[in-house]
């Protein structure tokens, strides 16, 4: 299913995409409780089919169907982004060892500290993706204004290795109307656009799941900022999720997230995962259809 959203053209710039099996290494930074972590882990474990933790196939529409838009992006050899993604490792930093306020560059120091060669628990996997998830009392440079999450790659001068990574913050206390939309709406939209009920009961974490999906899709299709993006400026690329920000279903536009499924208990969602989880995650740009695309809801 597609929604036309932009006149931008997605261009391949000859760099690599992530085509081999990929392990995700999660760094839980700050104060996290297990039930909130399980929402994120179940989403990540639903990307692949079959899931390493799943005992039955996902109901449709599914997270695995949503990821197929990403796997259509190929490198110059004709190999597409992998559909085999697993959570390969996790570690916690409940002591806020790098503080509660830092710049985007500081994320690389958090990753460095988490690696085994530096006394951490995570292995160095040059084919993996490192995911830093900060608690709701941590402030990041540009958080709530121009960044709900971002992806890049580590510098050898800081980490010692070149590793693709993602950062996403929990906006529940600071700016849910900005970074957890449509489970919360900004003040200028209140009264005209209703907030939707979060599918897993947590506005901050359910909002993080959508941002995380956004950033992972861009990481896998543009890990070193030289593969798939619109335009010619790698310092400010428009990537495959940027073109569909705010689009969660058919008919989206003007602050309306689109036609979305609603469960009997009133929660809103547009895809299913394993363990009976439901998620509401933004759609992604399909270069084949030249439109925002998501799993069919029919």
Image: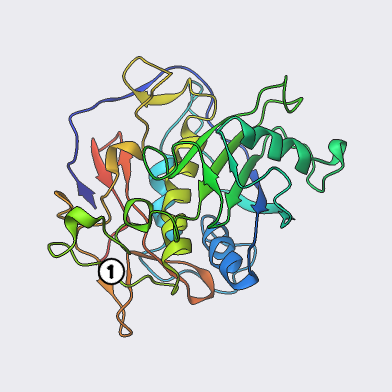
Q: Quadrant of residue 18?
A: top right
Kindly identify the residue that appears in the image at 64 percent across and 67 percent down: 53
Q: Is residue 250 visible?
A: no
Q: Nearer the viewer, residue 285 or 41?
A: 41
Q: Secondary structure at mark 1?
A: loop
Vertical relation: 151 (above or below) 197: above
Residue 155 on image: x %, y % = 66, 23
Residue 46 on image: x %, y % = 52, 61
- Which residue is the site of mark 1? 196
Kindly identify the residue that appears in the image at 19 percent across and 40 percent down: 5
Kindly identify the residue that appears in the image at 63 percent across and 63 percent down: 32
Vertical relation: 272 (above or below) 178: below
Q: Nearer the viewer, residue 71 or 233?
A: 233
Quadrant into which the C terminus falls = bottom left
Query: Position of 33 compared to 104: left or right?
Result: right
Q: Nearer the viewer, residue 257 or 83?
A: 257
Q: Nearer the viewer, residue 135 or 219?
A: 135
């Amino acid at each position: 299913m597609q929604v036309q959203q932009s006149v931008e053209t997605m261009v391949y710039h000859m760099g690599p995409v992530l085509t081999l099996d990929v392990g995700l290494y999660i760094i839980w930074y700050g104060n996290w409780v297990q039930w909130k972590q399980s929402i994120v882990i179940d989403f990540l474990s639903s990307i692949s089919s079959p899931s390493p933790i799943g005992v039955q196939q996902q109901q449709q529409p599914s997270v695995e169907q949503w990821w197929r838009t990403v796997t259509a992006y190929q490198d110059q050899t004709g190999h597409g982004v992998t559909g085999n993604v697993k959570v390969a490792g996790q570690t916690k930093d409940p002591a806020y060892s790098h503080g509660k306020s830092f710049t985007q560059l500081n994320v690389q120091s958090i990753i460095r500290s988490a690696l085994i060669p530096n006394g951490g628990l995570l292995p160095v996997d040059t084919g993996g993706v490192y995911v830093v998830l900060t608690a709701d009392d941590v402030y990041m440079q540009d958080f709530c204004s121009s960044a709900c999450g971002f992806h890049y790659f580590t510098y050898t001068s800081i980490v010692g290795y070149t590793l693709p990574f993602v950062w996403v913050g929990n906006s529940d206390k600071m700016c849910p109307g900005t970074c957890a939309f449509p489970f919360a709406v900004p003040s200028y939209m209140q009264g005209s656009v209703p907030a939707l009920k979060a599918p897993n009961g947590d506005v901050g974490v359910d909002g993080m799941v959508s941002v995380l999906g956004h950033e992972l899709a861009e990481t896998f299709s543009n890990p070193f900022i030289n593969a798939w993006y619109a335009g010619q400026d790698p310092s400010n690329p428009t990537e495959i999720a940027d073109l569909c920000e705010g689009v969660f279903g058919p008919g989206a536009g003007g602050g309306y997230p689109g036609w979305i499924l609603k469960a009997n208990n009133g929660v809103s969602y547009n895809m299913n995962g394993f363990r009976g989880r439901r998620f509401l995650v933004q759609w992604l740009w399909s270069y084949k259809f030249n439109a925002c695309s998501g799993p069919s809801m029919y």
